[in-house]
Amino acid sequence: MGRPTLLTTAEEDQVVDWVKLLRSYKLPVSKPALIAKVIFAMGDSAEERLPDGQLGRKWYDGFLRRHRNDLGTLATGSLESGRDDW
């Protein structure tokens, strides 16, 4: 058993659902956007849980690893590369 996660299960599910929603609209999800969503999901407790106001260095990788079956990769290529498909 590893270290406890920063977000509750409900908060992580909320973020995963948000990523899936954006992807359903073919919108890219960048690392900064994901981090902003996570801080928003924490609500008023963000200051308490993030004393320095930032997520840990390895948080992003751990989140992707925990949700790899749901999210796959969050590679955000250029929007131009997919415009030919529209």
Image (cartoon, rainbow, N blue to C red):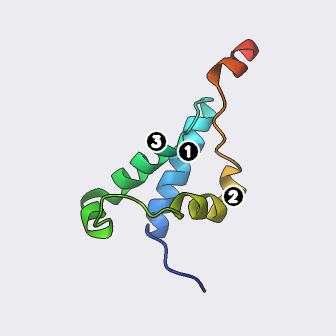
Which residue is identified by label 2?
Answer: 68
Q: Nearer the viewer, residue 5 or 9?
A: 5
Q: Determine the residue located farthest toward the right in the rendered image.
A: 85
Give the side of residue 83 with respect to residue 19, left or right.
Answer: right
Which of the marked residues, 1 or 2, is nearer the chain's N terminus? 1
> How far is mark 1 from mark 2, CA to CA?
12 Å
Disc 1: which residue = 19
Which picture quadrant has residue 28? top right
Q: Residue 6 at what x, y percent from top left?
A: 44, 69
Callout 3: 10 Å neighbours few (<14), some, many (20+)?
few
Q: Nearer the viewer, residue 10 or 65?
A: 65
The amino acid type of the residue labelled 1 equals: Val
Q: Amino acid at mark 2?
A: Arg
Quarter that holds the C terminus: top right
Q: Residue at x 75, y 16 (%)?
A: 85
Mark 3 against mark 2, which lies toward the viewer?
3
Q: Regarding mark 1 in the picture, which secondary structure is present there?
A: helix
Q: Amino acid at mark 3?
A: Ala
